[in-house]
Every structure is written in C-alpha cells, then in structure tokens.
Image (tube, grey):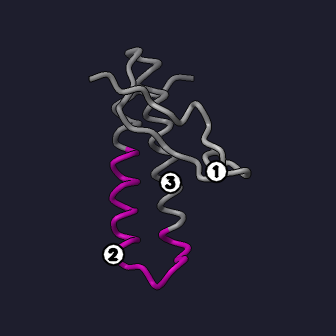
Amino acid sequence: MSIDPRVALQSLTAALEEHLAAASARRGDGDPSVEAAFFAVADAFEVYEDALYEAYNEVTPLQVFDDEEDEEEDGEVDDEDLEIVEE
C-alpha cells in the first residue's frame, strides 16, 4: 500500500505543529506530551520520506538519528559516522 507524498507531508506538518504546541506548553523536564510529540514527528517524517522515495525516487536532506544506535559502548567512532569532505 503506497501513501501519497502530499498526504504524508500534511501529516508531517501537523506533527510539527503539535510538537511546537507541546513544547510551548511544556510542564517541566521529561514532559510526556513533548516526548510523544517528538516521536510523532520522527514517525511522520519516516512515512513522508518513504512515500517520497516510492513515488519519485527522491529523498530529503534530513535524517532522523536514533541515540541508541549512534552511541558506541567502547567510545570508538563508527566509520559510517565519518564523512569525507572534498575541497
């Protein structure tokens, strides 16, 4: 089942607006409504990115990071985290 990228974009926009509303009404550190809105944005973004790729073979310049995956237990840098910059 494919999702229209425009519909996915509208869902992402709505999730971003909800995140802003939750952040502006934050009731302290670890507010569950802010955390829920944060994850809703990440989920909506992934749906949009998938729909965009499926429909147009295109991606955005954005990336969702998962803190658990990015942290190395031994403190070593993962080669995938390195980027070669050509001058």
Circle 3 residues within 10 Å: few <14, some 14–19, many ≥20:
some
Residue 6 relative to residue 39: left or right: left
In the drawing, what numbered circle is on residue 24? 2
Q: Which mark is residue 30?
A: none
Question: Which residue corresponds to mark 1?
Answer: 71
Residue that appears at 34% across and 65% down: 20
- Residue 11 placed where, x, y %? 40, 45
**Three-letter amino acid code at the position of disc 2:** Ser
The range drawn in magenta is: 11-34
* Element marked by disc 1: loop
Q: Residue at point 35% right, 69% down?
A: 21
Say left or right for 23 vs 71: left
Residue found at the very far bottom of the displayed protein: 27
Q: Indicate the amino acid at tag 1.
A: Glu
**Residue 60 lies in the magenta-colored region:** no
- Residue 38 location in percent, x, y? 48, 59
Q: CA distance from mark 1 to mark 2?
A: 29 Å
Is disc 3 placed on a helix, strand or loop?
A: helix
Q: Which residue, given by chain and number where applicable, does mark 3 sit on?
A: 40
Q: What element does badge 2 sit on?
A: helix
Depth check, front residue: 61 or 70: 70
Which of 78/66 is in front? 78
Q: Nearer the viewer, mark 3 or mark 1?
A: 1
Above-or-below relation of 83 to 32:
above
Marks 2 and 3, how far apart in space? 16 Å
